[in-house]
Amino acid sequence: MLTELSPESQQIVQNLRRFVDREVIPVASKMEHDNEYPFTLVEQMKEMGLFGILIPREYGGLGLDYVTYAAITEELSRGWMSLGGIINSHYVVAHAINEFGTADQKQRFLPDMAAGQRRACICMTEPNAGSDLQAIELAATRDGDRYLLNGTKMFVTNGRHGNLYLVLAKTDKAAKPPYRGMSTFVVEKGVPGFTIGRDVEKLGYKGVDTVVLHFEDAQVEARNLLEGVEGRGFGHVMSGIEVGRINTAARAVGLAQAAFEDAIRYAQQRHAFGVPIAQHQAIQFKLADMATQIEAARLLTYQAAAVKDRGVRSDKEAGMAKLFATEVAGFVSLEAMRIHGGYGYTKDMRVERYYRDAPFMMIAEGTNEVQRLVIARALLREYAEGAGS
């Protein structure tokens, strides 16, 4: 797929590949086992401009396309899936601000986001509202030239080490349907009434902070209401989630590629019955299926990114990519473990990390069951009776 990228984008991806091979892969497993936040790697990512990939050049970003973003996310995640997560919510928020923010909001936030000085988090999920976002309870009440936010958000990636939060809230609890009463706010770290709660312990996806956030009459300036208009928040986050699903699909491809590379390398080194296990047909079939599914997942992911680049609705394509690629990551990571045999079940091998990380992506950015609903609804719109006649 690198042949589809511009020369500039190809160079960026190739440089990133070298960075991943030299700086990320040698330290990722230990940092992941220790659940250590990758401060040094994040600083290097800042220097490489990775927090400004999708931010327009007028605000100090690189102004690159979504296909390049997918390729960059894949490479980062080939080294360590958590690094792809650190930039994910950052770009969901950057997209929302760039697409819907006022001129003042863009000028105040995007330049620092492009430099990585502000790293952003998307705050949607609540204890009683996950896939059903219209069920959120966090409320925002107008109080003069500010809003007071009350409620709790959870599963917030980058919540502790980030410093800019896009918070989905209800400004009109009586609205019917509920999404019409939802708004988004850009909340800066340190505002009165906003506190960071406990870290969420996870099976995988370690090294990146996932926290609970508390809002108790949290004071947010009215000028931080995204777009400056109440009632449009649901649309803001839905558009951003398309970006998040492309990221998650690309992360899944990167993880699957890493698992495949480890497996095929091991299969050529490990001997059984007098020959490398790669010469056994049972292993060859596994490798063939793994490689084929990875390539299909990659093509779906880049196709979804290309649709997003055209500026049209991409919920179907992003949903398909996210659904298929994450299921492939689960399949490939398990097959890689089986090829490694008993060693694959130990922490001495990277495949156990891939196996623990893969399920997260089937759940993140809308579960894969939700993706099937999104895809089906898009197909029903597309093939509505009489459409195109």
Image (cartoon, rainbow, N blue to C red):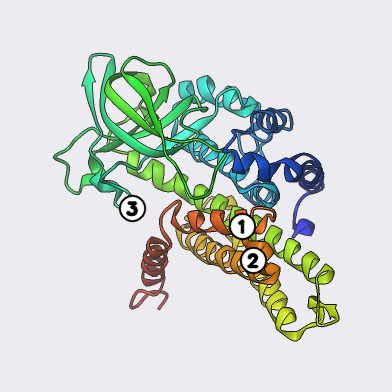
**Is there any visible trace of residue 350 in the rendered image?**
yes
As drawn, is 47 to the left or to the right of 194?
right
Q: What type is the residue that disc 3 sits on?
A: Ser
Q: Residue at x 68, y 54 (%)?
A: 350
Q: Secondary structure at mark 3?
A: loop
Residue matched to label 2: 337
Q: Residue at x 59, y 51 (%)?
A: 309
As drawn, is 331 to the left or to the right of 146?
right
Q: Secondary structure at mark 1?
A: helix
Residue matched to label 3: 131
Residue 352 is marked as 1
Of callouts 3 and 1, which one flags the residue occurring earlier in the amino acid sequence?
A: 3
Q: Are marks 3 and 2 in contact (CB under 8 Å)?
A: no
User: Does 319 sit above or below residue 229?
Assistant: below
User: Does 112 sit above or below residue 251?
Assistant: above
Q: What type is the residue that disc 1 sits on?
A: Glu
* Residue 380 pos. (x, y %): 36, 71
Query: Residue 143 falls in which quadrant of the image?
Result: top left
Residue closest to the eye, 82 or 3: 82
Residue closest to the eye, 388 or 124: 124
Of callouts 1 and 2, which one flags the residue occurring earlier in the amino acid sequence?
A: 2
Residue closest to the eye, 265 or 215: 265
Label 3 Cα crowd, 10 Å radius (few <14 / some 14-19 / many 20+):
some
* Residue 102 pos. (x, y %): 44, 27
Q: Residue at x 40, y 67 (%)?
A: 372
Q: Are marks 1 and 2 in contact (CB under 8 Å)?
A: yes
Query: Residue 201 falls in which quadrant of the image?
Result: top left
